[in-house]
């Protein structure tokens, strides 16, 4: 698995970064990133739907590509990539497909962001600890 966001993907691929990428550009980057893995690319940051944030899930071995979405929250914080990756790996280890794991990880990260918004005393990272028990419900309800 490789799990970059668009900024990281641009860095890896030596491409200029920009605020928004077209769906075609996202798919092209996912395909180029597949050179760095034997199977899966999860490219985060598809902003082509106004109120949703998408992730491209490319399976190099099976030649398939899915896009999964979560509600978009306009909030930037350090550590969300690590929270996403942890929830993603845990979901895969619990038998979820990469697309379902990406959806679960996105929902879990969104919940952590929602707990953090408005807390002026919390300056770094998101409050994932406050939603950790909710991942069990996400594992049950998202397939």
Image (tube, rainbow, N blue to C red):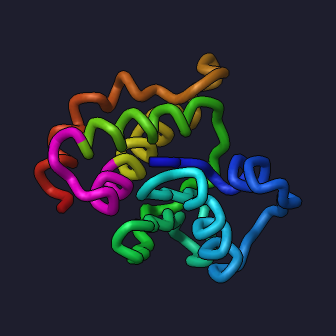
In reply to whether residue 43 is colored magenta, the answer given is no
Q: Position of residue 130 (x, y in %)?
A: 35, 25
Along the line of sight, the residue nearer the viewer: 13 or 67: 13
Instruction: Establish if 58 lies above or below 85.
Output: below
Q: Position of residue 66 (x, y in %)?
A: 40, 74
The region drawn magenta spans 93-104
On screen, residue 7 versus residue 1, left or right, reads right
Q: In what quadrant of the picture does the C terminus appear?
A: bottom left
Instruction: Establish if 74 lies above or below 51.
Output: above
Instruction: Establish if 49 lies above or below 135.
Output: below
Q: Quadrant of residue 80?
A: top right
Residue at the outermost top position: 121
Residue at the outermost bottom position: 24
- Mostly what secondary structure, the magenta segment? helix
Instruction: Establish if 63 lies above or below 14.
Output: below
Tell me the residue at 51%/52% (across/down).
37
């Amino acid at each position: 698995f490789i799990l970059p966001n668009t900024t990281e993907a641009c860095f890896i691929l030596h491409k200029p970064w920009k605020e928004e990428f077209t769906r075609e550009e996202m798919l092209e980057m996912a395909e180029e990133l597949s050179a760095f893995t034997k199977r899966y690319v999860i490219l985060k940051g598809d902003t082509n739907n106004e109120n949703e944030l998408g992730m491209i899930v490319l399976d190099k071995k099976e030649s398939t590509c899915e896009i999964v979405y979560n509600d978009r929250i306009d909030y930037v914080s350090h550590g969300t990539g690590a929270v996403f990756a942890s929830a993603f790996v845990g979901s895969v280890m619990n038998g979820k497909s990469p697309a379902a794991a990406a959806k679960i990880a996105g929902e879990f990260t969104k919940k952590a962001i929602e707990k953090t918004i408005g807390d002026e005393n919390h300056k770094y990272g998101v409050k994932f600890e406050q939603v950790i028990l909710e991942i069990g419900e996400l594992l049950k309800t998202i397939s």
